[in-house]
Image (cartoon, rainbow, N blue to C red):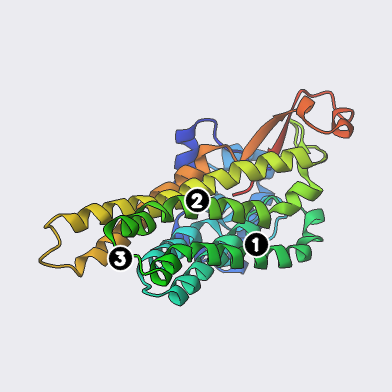
Amino acid sequence: MPTLEKTFLQRFCHWLDILDPLLLFPSYVEIDKSRMLLETSRENITESLQDNKLKKAWKLSLASVHPGTGDIIPPMFRPPALMPFAAPLAFATFSLHRGVKQAFIWQFLFHSYTGAFSLANGNSTKMANEFLYKQLLPTTGTVLYSSCVGALPQYFLKRYKLYNPIAQVFFKTIVPGPLTALLCMMNVMVIRSTELVSGIEVVDSNGNVIGLSRKAGEKAVKETAWLRAALFGTAVFIPDIAEHYLKRTRILLRNPHALPLLRLIMTTVIIGTMIPVSFSWEPQVGKIQRSELESEIVSSTEETELFYYRGI
């Protein structure tokens, strides 16, 4: 169970360190060496982290290793990879298509990546990993469904030849942001549904595992789902609104080809800002009152407050 800072600002600074894209390049061998180094310094970890070498090992481990399973996460699904992969996909999904087929393909790539990221960084335990194969059909289904629904605005515009300004503003500016937020929320809820069914580990203040709780799993998934919705909903809605007003001004009349570049910059900046904000908004180690949990867990401990790992 990782130790997270108490305030939002401390958590935000923590994630700024962890989200360094350079942490994607060390090999599996280097990551294993870092983990071994931390293991040997476990007894005096607070004092040891004053050492620069151990600080780097700690950052690399947090950025590369799943806290629940101890497995090394594939590079493209680690937290530092989210911005480099998601920003271009989000830009292409809502900017680089002129037809329904192209819209569906980009939506499929976007939701496939974000879905795989959710699966790789969910609140998995060794026990839950035995049931990951059961997620294949729901994961595939939710990605296809999200891709179809995400392409609907483009479909309506083409199918019914909605060329009037009001329809164009509605389907191109107003709808995509909230629709993306809802689809990303659903994506997280379905793909991490094993946490709702089998539960997640809850621990006491000493880190001892008390049991598996479906209620804690529901709380963890819901918290992550609405934060993911805020992340990508904002990343789509703000550039759409900005693009709409820029088109109405004379700023881009001399160079209309500058609009895609501005859209790419806006999308990248917003996602780059919102990722650490969304990761930091709620502590990764959540608290839940014992009275809110299942009866078998209530009877297993006298502590009034228990803890769980939320996932990202």
Q: In this view, does 184 lie to the left or right of 87?
A: right
| Residue beneath the point at 60% across and 56% down | 187
Q: In this view, does 23 lie to the left or right of 258?
A: right
Amino acid type shown at disc 1: Ile
Front tag of 1 and 3: 3
Look at the image and tell me in which quarter the N terminus lies: top right
Q: Is mark 2 on a helix, strand or loop?
A: helix
Q: Earlier in the sequence, mark 3 or mark 2?
A: 3
Q: Which residue does the numbered mark 2 point to in the structure image? A: 181
| Residue beneath the point at 53% across and 69% down | 108
Front tag of 1 and 2: 2
Amino acid type shown at disc 2: Ala
The answer to whether mark 1 and mark 3 are in CB contact below 8 A is no
Q: Label 3: how many residues lie within 10 Å, few (<14), some (14-19) or many (20+)?
A: few
| Residue beneath the point at 20% across and 66% down | 258
Q: Which of marks 1 and 2 is nearer the N terminus?
A: 1
User: Residue 203: percent from the left, percent from the top?
Assistant: 76, 36
Amino acid type shown at disc 3: Tyr
Q: Determine whether 221 is above or below 253 in the image.
A: above
User: Residue 265: percent from the left, percent from the top?
Assistant: 30, 59
Q: Which residue does the numbered mark 1 point to in the structure image? A: 72
Q: Determine whether 83 is above or below 301 in the image.
A: below
Marker disc for residue 163: 3
Q: Which of 11 and 38 is in front in this view?
A: 11
Q: Label 2: how many residues lie within 10 Å, few (<14), some (14-19) or many (20+)?
A: many
Query: Residue 124: in sight, yes or no?
Result: no
Distance between mark 1 and mark 3 Cα atoms: 50 Å
Distance between mark 1 and mark 2 Cα atoms: 29 Å
Distance between mark 3 and mark 2 Cα atoms: 26 Å
Q: What element carries label 1?
A: loop
